[in-house]
Image: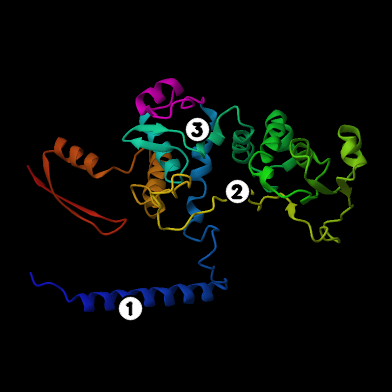
Amino acid sequence: MPQADPICEITVLASLITSAVQDVVREYSNAGHILPSLNSTQPGPLDAPHLYEEPACLLVVTSAKSILLGKPDGMPLIELAKQTGIDSGKLGRILRMLAMKHCFKEVKPDVFANNRLSMQLVSTNPVSVLVGHMTASSTSPHDTHTIAGLILPPQRFVQAMVGWGEIYAWGRVSKDAVICDVGGGNGHATLCLMKEFPHLKVVLQDTPVYWNAQYPQTVEKQRVHFAPIDFFVDEPVPKCDFYYAMDNGSHLLIHAFVLQHTVRDSTNSSLEQVPEPLLANYGMGKIRLYQQDINMMTLVSSKERTLEEFVNLAKQGGFRFEHLWDSGEAGLLEFSVA
């Protein structure tokens, strides 16, 4: 078989990319939408149908016990299934879905361990309660009244509010940094912060009653400034270092890991080396396969199978594997009668 001209191949590829970009621009324009920036981390239109899978998987693991705690080498899936009472096949697929998002780590086939992100889901960590608080019940006013939804699990709501203060590295914030707690109510979130990090200052845009009763020294030392606000008229206090405002569209404020230079320095042991950029299975580039696996499980009690599983299944039916025709997400398997 004659080899294709590499110049011709790369030229055709460039034409395909250019044509595809033009199609995307045209479709966004026809729909009246602004073309999203490549720098945006917000979910796009192709992500929207799968946004339910991750919180559903998080809810499963936070509802189970913290079995992996203290086991850095991980635990076999069979043992995890026994201790949680969850079917091993379903549990493994849930954990792999989360591992694709760098929550948990599959150290080897069917052996899972905690990592820095999944440690936030340990039951003793208040941050873990946020998962149940944000995923177990709808907060949409079209589904249920928001306040009623918060009254039902009051203990979980209180713990979740404590968790907010443990997410961001407040200890590294400069002295006298000012946080504007927009619509802070009784100031429960920033009150916990100031008790833990007394170098912070707060502008609370709501009521001062709670602070005078619970933490009067902050008022006396003028570390808290109260400013009334009407969301429909006023704007938040300007020139603050941080603005704390939560609603259905808000995102958690997290501490970003500052990546070092891409050239690794094996001679300097004092520097923490940057982790490998991709998982062994190419990470998010293959996420749709894992999302579809969760869909198959929840909708028709089935699954997406690996190549090895397809080969074993075909062997049971009297077929022999011949070839895998790889076409990205839609590969083709060829079998023949054994």
For disc 2, the marked residue is 255
Mark closest to the chain's N terminus, 3 or 1: 1
Where's residue 211, x and y in %? 87, 38
Say if 261 sits above or below 125 in the image: below
* In the foreground, 87 or 198: 198
Question: Residue lying farthest top?
Answer: 83
Specify whether 335 is left or right of 276.
left
- Where's the N terminus, which quadrant? bottom left
For disc 3, the marked residue is 61
Q: Which residues are magenta?
A: 65-87
Counting labels gives: 3
Say whether marks 2 and 1 touch (CB < 8 Å): no
Where's residue 121, x and y in %? 55, 34
**Is 226 colored magenta in this rendering?**
no
* In the foreground, 300 or 24: 24
Say if 150 sits above or below 285 in the image: above
Q: Quadrant of residue 95?
A: top left
Q: Residues within 10 Å of mark 3 (few under 14, many from 20)?
A: many
For disc 1, the marked residue is 15
* In the foreground, 206 or 31: 206
Residue type highlighted by circle 2: His
Residue type highlighted by circle 3: Val
Where's residue 161, x and y in %? 71, 37
Residue at image coords 89%, 52%? 227
Where's residue 317, x and y in %? 15, 38
How much space separates mark 3 and mark 2, taking CA atoms? 23 Å
Residue type highlighted by circle 1: Ser
Mark closest to the chain's N terminus, 2 or 1: 1
